[in-house]
Image (spheres, helix red, strand yellow):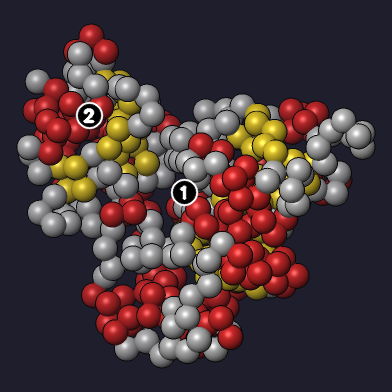
Amino acid sequence: MINGYIDLRSDTVSVPTPAMREAMASAEVGDDVYGEDPTVNKLQDMAAARLGKEAALFVSSGTQGNLVSLLAHLGRGDEFIVGDRSHIYLSEAGGSAALVGAHPMVLHNHPDGTLNVDEVTAAIKPENEHYAHTRLVCLENTHNQCYGSPLSAEYVKQIADVAHAHDLMLHIDGARIFNAASALGVPASALVKEADSVTFCLSKGLGAPVGSVICGTKAFIARAHRARKLVGGAMRQAGIIAAAGVVALETMVDRLAEDHANAKRLALRLSAIPGITIDVDKVQSNLVFFDLDPARGIDGATFSARVAKHNVRIGGTAYRTRIRAVTHCWVTQAEVDQAADAIAASMA
């Protein structure tokens, strides 16, 4: 519970743990622009090791991490292949166009978050003066808008093989990559082994108050470092916030399975409520999507307002009657049951 509410709007609402607050208060700091903040350096080294990459870079957010990665991979007028339900395409304020100057080649995301491998291959442009140069493929894992689905290492390798055979790079928006790893029962490094770059968020399921990390080769991170400066993302004594990220990697990764179990429990409870449609089998991580019966005449905003009267916060989606609930470290099993009861009362 956060500030008196069972807050299911997002895992971004999670607040730092007492251990994180203590680490932040006592963090050793320096000037990170000069590479002299020991806590930032520790976080970056930990992140790179966790994901099996050569180097890493601390950034302020997942959106900034993706933007910086695109800037490091692409030139103006270059093309990147991306899904039509991806966060990079839908939810980052058009940064790829406004700031990178890159052209998206948008393909259909299947309900499990995948792109069709043959369609990816066909989308890669041949050398021709009429076409943009295709340089990059972007995947998302877990896939937020596709029911929080995790992408397997085998699938990622298929896409990577296609990309690399055509001299393209592969970037993974791994905002919730540790959720994907937990759901699939594999190390996160296995899910990004074939990727040239990956971002992950510290401020979602891992519970830190702010920040994301980009991982890749040393050469890529050098370009990303410059791109971070370009967009105003260079921070000075950033160890104060990086300290929470260190604690997050040390203490929060292994507990993500609890959030997944709570999400499944919530989905099962919701499946028994009249007026709600949900595919329980699609709940594989900490994201729960369900639909309100349009005949009830309740849209997402009305539903959220009703549930809030029961001290439960929940969020709508771009679809008028689709609702998303997200479990995280500040939602207990008992609170899941309380939330389900509140939703049932709100639908009565």
Q: In the displayed structure, would residue 309 be above or below residue 39?
A: above
Where residue 301 is drawn, which disc sits there? 2
Amino acid type indicated by mark 2: Ala
Q: Position of residue 55 (x, y in %)?
A: 65, 73
Going from N to C along the chain, the mark reached first, 1 or 2, is 1
Q: In the displayed structure, would residue 116 be above or below residue 75?
A: above
Q: Position of residue 146 (x, y in %)?
A: 48, 34
User: Residue at 51% across / 37% down in the picture?
Assistant: 90
Q: Is residue 229 left or right of residue 40?
A: right
Q: Quadrant of residue 297?
A: top left
| Quadrant where the N terminus is found in the figure | bottom left
Q: Residue furthest top?
A: 295
Q: State whether residue 263 appears in this view.
A: yes
Which structural element holds mark 1?
Answer: helix
Q: 99 or 1: which is nearer to us?
A: 99
Q: 104 or 187: which is nearer to us?
A: 104
Amino acid type indicated by mark 1: Ala
Q: In the displayed structure, would residue 111 be above or below residue 243?
A: above
Which structural element holds mark 2?
Answer: helix
Cα distance between the residues tagged 1 and 2: 31 Å
Q: Is residue 310 left or right of residue 159?
A: left
Q: Position of residue 42 (x, y in %)?
A: 51, 82
Instruction: Mark 2: give few (<14), some (14-19) or many (20+) Cα within 10 Å.
Output: some
Q: Position of residue 116 (x, y in %)?
A: 68, 29
Q: Which residue is mark 1?
A: 183
